[in-house]
Amino acid sequence: MRRLALLLGLLFSVGAAYGEQWILAGAVIDGERDEILGPHTFRIRDGVIVAMEVGLHSAPTDAAATVIDLSDHTVLPGLMDMHTHLTTEYSADVYIE
């Protein structure tokens, strides 16, 4: 799960360099409901999710889009590992040291 979250974060952060991406997700946790949603297709443009559609859709053949097939996985859009341990930061260079 951690690798998947890292992958999605990376894809969203470099989205502008690759045009549009389509992510085919087998299931989705949207963070608002108490249930896991079924298959969805995400369209991402310039690092921003512009559409979340029910079902697995194919990108148009004339579209210059990268398709990422995660149809065998559950995804959680927007999740990023941004935690830190403040109690162990004794100096500004603690991570370098």
Image (cartoon, rainbow, N blue to C red):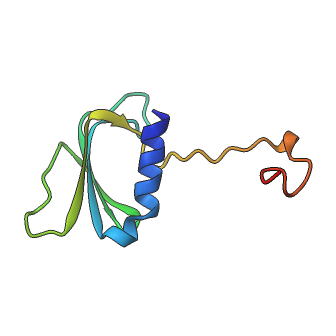
Residue 4 x/y as whole percent: 42, 40
Residue shown at 78%/41% (left/top)? 85
Quarter-of-image position of residue 28: top left
Count the numbered circles shown. Answer: 0
Residue at 48% of width from left, 45% of height from top? 6
- Furthest residue to the front? 97
**95 horizontally vs 62: left or right:** right
The residue located at (51%, 45%) in the rendering is 79
Visible residue check, residue 40: yes
The answer to whether residue 89 is left or right of residue 10 is: right
Nearer the observer, 56 or 95: 95
* Res 59 → quadrant: bottom left
Pinpoint residue 73: horizontal percent, then vertical percent. 31, 33
Evaluate whether residue 31 shows in this view: no
Q: Is residue 93 above or below residue 46?
A: above
The furthest residue to the left? 61
Look at the picture and state if 61 lies above or below 76: below
Q: Position of residue 78 (x, y in %)?
A: 47, 49
Q: Is residue 11 above or below residue 46?
A: above
Query: Left or right of 47: which side holds 59?
Result: left
Q: Looking at this view, is 8 or 91 the one in front? A: 91
In the picture as drawn, the residue positioned furthest to the top comes out as 35
Q: Classify 3 as above or below 22.
A: above
Q: Position of residue 77 (x, y in %)?
A: 42, 47
Q: Is residue 90 left or right of residue 66?
A: right
Quarter of the image with the N terminus is top left
Point 46% across, 38% down: residue: 3
